[in-house]
Amino acid sequence: MPLAIKGIGIDLVNLPRVQRVLQRFPLRFPSRILTAREATWFDELQDEARRVQFIANRWATKEALFKAVSGTVPVTWKDVELYSTPSGQPKCRLFEYYHMHVSISHDHDQTVALVIREVALASNRSVQAGYKGKLHRMSPVRQFDASLEDFSRRLKE
């Protein structure tokens, strides 16, 4: 099924700033932005520089993801989980509806993350629905967004 880009987000994080925040709030800061699984991975890290990089990567990626999904569904820090494939490729988990591409890079004291959100485009036949006895064509993107809104409503109930 063909995919279309529906959102793009990018974020830049300053590592010394993250380090200062971690030193000031060593327990509260990670607990607010990391999922339970990410917190477990974070706790296993011994090297302070690696811990700072770990938090910065997640901060930048989650901020970029918030921008990529902006206006579609409310997302919190703990709704998003960043992980790596065995080959080292970064991936995001966010509900079941999203197909995301993630790229993270860092140099000396900066980390940047880019997130591209794609949606599946259905054929015209698959998005036709009966509406008051007439065929009503709904664009694939509008149909997808409507399903996200419904999913979001169910989460809040």
Image (cartoon, rainbow, N blue to C red):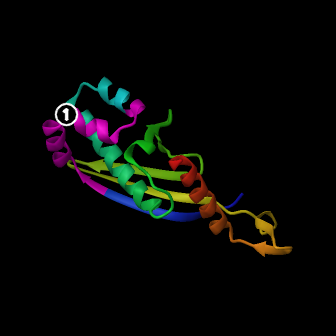
Residue at left offset 54%, top offset 65%: 6
Q: Residue 97 in the image: x percent, y percent?
A: 59, 51
The reply, left or right, for residue 131 in relation to residue 24 is right
Q: Residue 121 in the image: x percent, y percent?
A: 68, 63
Do we see residue 98 in this rendering? no
Q: Is residue 16 above or below residue 67?
A: above
Few, some or many C-alpha atoms within 10 Å of disc 1 (few <14, some 14-19, many ≥20)?
A: few
Residue at left offset 13%, top offset 39%: 24
Q: Which stretch is magenta?
A: 12-38
Q: Residue furthest front?
A: 157
Residue at left offset 45%, top offset 44%: 79
Residue placed most toward the observer, 102 or 153 = 153
Q: Residue 26 in the image: x percent, y percent?
A: 19, 33
The reply, left or right, for residue 69 in relation to residue 31 is right
Residue at left offset 79%, top offset 63%: 126
Q: Is residue 20 above or below residue 65?
A: above
Residue placed most toward the observer, 106 or 128 = 128
Secondary structure mainly formed by the magenta segment: helix
Q: Residue furthest right?
A: 133
Q: Which residue is mark 1?
A: 26
| Total marks placed | 1
Quadrant of image for the N terminus: bottom right
The amino acid marked with disc number 1 is: Pro
The reply, left or right, for residue 97 in relation to residue 92 is right
Secondary-structure class at tag 1: loop
Q: Residue 83 in the image: x percent, y percent?
A: 45, 38
Residue 1 part of the magenta segment: no
Do we see residue 135 in this rendering? yes
Q: Where on the picture, by quarter, is residue 139?
A: bottom right
